[in-house]
């Protein structure tokens, strides 16, 4: 990672030297700041603002998702001798606009009439990219209110749940601009419901020398920490659309299937995805293959991976998500009537019938229980199948299913004895993932229901996989091998090993010595604490006091090799966002 003195050692570089460094390293001609605001669309920041830089000319403009018009800036002149792509550097910010959760929506950015890229609210550094363009945002300042609290950040930003500020770079092809002239950059808000979330743009004068531009360049380069020698990819594999063939637009979710895939592969900013429709939303026979073929169409190995899957929606036995490894698979309904959700044993197909039908299809699959303690449809742990149920979804928009009383909590009633830790006490062995269970057409950052605030402003849940390549098969294999973990919807990089074995491993008991746990975490925000859970009990807490990175080595002095022992790790950031490792078993 470069810093203020890397390039020349004894002095900071001048502006033109930073521009030259960006050109040589990335093949990008950097254009710093904006020249003129053409159309406001939103509202000004006022004199008292919350900047990420010491210097500001007070031209901060905010574009809420409720705005009727766009925000239009003209850049400073593109150099006459421009080579390669062009990168516009400016200040950016994202915020919730309310202490309550809000629909996510998106902002569509175009340059001189060319559709460039779409982004959404984030409270962490993030990189969006497609074939032509890249938008990199480095969150230098992150503010987050306590749970159900609010922030007063400036004269313009009051009653905020969270906000993030930092430098940004929008990279576009040189063919889109005219050398010697400024480019017209237009940002348009788009959201199905009413939302107070906002996007901020500011000229950020002298950003190349008066801010830590090198962190932005790391984001632009797509650099990510590795975990246990593997790349880490983040995805959302539990969402629903509004498509229902028997009753058009009457599905339990929002938007068409294509719109959900477009959002997941675009503004959501995730690496892999599964549209896991309830089985009653998919027509039998030819409709099943048509539904799965859509996943194949959006699957782009190396760029965006999609899984074939669906939700086995049994109100009688509990909900399970089914994921297939390859291009096979089938859908088996939880109800005897295909177009209903069984609410009575007389109308329900049994769980053994599910296993039989899925095994007969010939494609490798996973079955993942989710929200197991939810009172409307509790999960029957007596029917747990260790062969196929190698994972449990510990977090979603429902909240945390880790243990009774956990924060952040869900919004529904819960059965105390059906949480993840209770299942671990039974001796069940499974990895942990998270995903949204989104129904609002905004995969990757969903709220509880379409257009409805959930009472939380935490994330909606991501699954993280440790693998070498981003392909459908590699994602599945990492999930199957439990080489994966859960986050509440932010890119927390978490490593967890015991005696060199990666998370998800099963080890023989140790005849001599004691287990040594090694934990590393690179947070999306400051880390509050790291907690070790042994045999479903909190065993050790390591306080991090807001550090972004932390490493911990802990030896279990009370290890008993006479019985099985299970360990996993939970990380909580200062903003409440969390991550849960998959366990490691000894014995």
Image (spheres, helix red, strand yellow):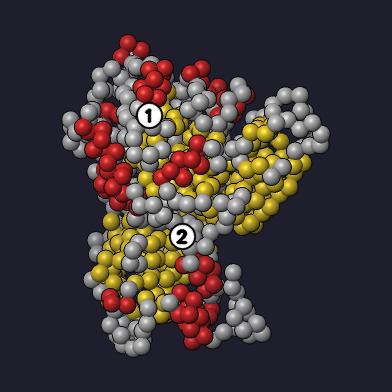
What separation in Å lies between label 2 and label 1 (alpha carbons)?
A: 39 Å
Which residue position is annotated with label 1? 362
Which residue position is annotated with label 2? 126
Pick the quarter of the image with the C terminus. top right
Closer to us: 152 or 537: 537
Res. 242 image quadrant: top left
Q: Residue at x 25, y 74 (%)?
A: 112
Closer to us: 267 or 583: 583
Q: Would you call the spot at circle 2 few (<14 residues within 10 Å), some (14-19), or many (20 or more)?
A: many
Q: Residue at x 23, y 71 (%)?
A: 113
Q: Residue at x 42, y 28 (%)?
A: 320
Q: Is residue 8 left or right of residue 246?
A: right
Pick the quarter of the image with the N terminus. bottom right
Res. 540 image quadrant: top right
Element on which disc 2 rests: strand
Q: Position of residue 67 (x, y in %)?
A: 28, 60
- Mark seen at residue 44: none
Q: Examine the rendering and report whether any part of residue 106 can be seen.
A: yes
Q: Would you call the spot at circle 1 few (<14 residues within 10 Å), some (14-19), or many (20 or more)?
A: few
Q: Position of residue 401 (x, y in %)?
A: 52, 32
Q: Examine the rendering and report whether any part of residue 251 can be seen.
A: no
Closer to us: 366 or 45: 366
Q: Is residue 69 above or below residue 381?
A: below
Q: Is residue 529 above or below residue 537?
A: below
Closer to us: 153 or 277: 277
Q: Position of residue 174 (x, y in %)?
A: 32, 77
Q: Earlier in the sequence, mark 2 or mark 1?
A: 2
**Numbered disc in front, either 2 or 1:** 1
Element on which disc 1 rests: loop
Q: Position of residue 429 (x, y in %)?
A: 58, 28
């Amino acid at each position: 990672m470069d810093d203020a003195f890397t390039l020349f050692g004894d002095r900071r570089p001048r502006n033109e030297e930073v521009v030259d460094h960006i050109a040589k390293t990335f093949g990008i001609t950097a254009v710093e700041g904006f020249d003129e605001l053409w159309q406001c669309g939103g509202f000004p920041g006022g004199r008292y603002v919350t900047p990420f830089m010491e210097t500001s000319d007070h031209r901060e403009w905010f574009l809420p998702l409720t705005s009727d018009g766009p925000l239009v800036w003209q850049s400073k002149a593109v150099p006459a001798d421009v080579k390669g792509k062009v990168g516009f550097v400016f200040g950016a910010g994202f915020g919730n606009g309310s202490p309550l959760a809000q629909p996510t929506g998106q902002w569509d950015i175009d340059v001189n009439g060319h559709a460039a890229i779409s982004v959404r609210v984030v409270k962490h550094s993030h990189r969006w990219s497609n074939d032509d363009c890249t938008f990199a945002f480095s969150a230098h300042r992150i503010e987050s209110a306590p749970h159900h609290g609010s922030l007063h950040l400036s004269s313009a930003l009051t009653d905020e749940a969270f906000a993030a500020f930092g430098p940004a770079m929008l990279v576009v092809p040189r063919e889109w601009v005219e050398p010697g002239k400024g480019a017209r950059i237009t940002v348009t808000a788009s959201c199905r419901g009413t939302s107070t979330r906002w996007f901020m743009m500011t000229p950020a004068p002298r950003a190349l020398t008066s801010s830590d531009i090198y962190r932005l360049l790391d984001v632009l380069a797509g650099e990510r920490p590795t975990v246990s020698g593997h790349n880490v990819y983040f995805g959302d594999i539990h969402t629903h659309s509004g498509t229902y063939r028997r009753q058009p637009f009457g599905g339990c979710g929002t938007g068409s299937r294509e719109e959900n895939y477009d959002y997941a592969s675009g503004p959501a900013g995730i690496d892999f995805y599964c549209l896991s429709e309830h089985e009653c939303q998919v027509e039998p026979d030819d409709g099943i293959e048509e539904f799965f073929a859509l996943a194949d169409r959006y699957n782009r190995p190396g760029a965006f991976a999609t899984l074939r899957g669906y939700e086995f929606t049994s109100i009688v036995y509990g909900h399970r998500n089914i994921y297939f490894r390859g291009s096979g698979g089938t859908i088996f309904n939880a109800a005897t009537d295909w177009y209903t959700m069984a609410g009575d044993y007389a109308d329900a197909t049994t769980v053994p019938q599910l296993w039989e039908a899925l095994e007969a299809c010939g494609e490798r699959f996973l079955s993942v229980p989710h929200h197991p303690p939810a009172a409307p449809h509790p999960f029957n742990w007596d029917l747990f199948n260790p062969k196929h149920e190698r994972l449990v979804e510990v977090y979603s928009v429902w909240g945390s299913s880790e243990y009774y009383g956990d924060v952040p909590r869900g919004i529904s009633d819960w059965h105390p004895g059906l949480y993840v830790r209770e299942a671990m006490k039974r001796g069940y062995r499974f990895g942990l993932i998270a995903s949204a269970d989104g129904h609002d057409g905004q995969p990757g950052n969903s709220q509880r229901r379409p257009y409805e605030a959930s009472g939380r402003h935490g994330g909606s849940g991501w699954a993280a996989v440790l693998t070498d390549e981003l392909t459908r098969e590699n994602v599945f294999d990492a999930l199957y091998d439990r080489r994966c973990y859960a986050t509440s919807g932010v890119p927390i990089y978490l490593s967890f090993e015991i005696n060199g074995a990666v998370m998800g491993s099963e080890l023989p008991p140790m005849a001599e010595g004691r287990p040594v746990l090694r934990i590393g975490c690179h947070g999306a925000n400051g880390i509050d604490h790291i907690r070790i859970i042994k045999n479903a009990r909190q065993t050790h807490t390591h306080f991090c006091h807001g550090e972004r990175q932390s490493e911990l080595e802990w030896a279990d002095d009370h290890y008993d090799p006479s019985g099985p022992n299970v360990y996993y790790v939970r990380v909580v950031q200062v903003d409440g966002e969390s991550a849960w490792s998959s366990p490691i078993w000894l014995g």
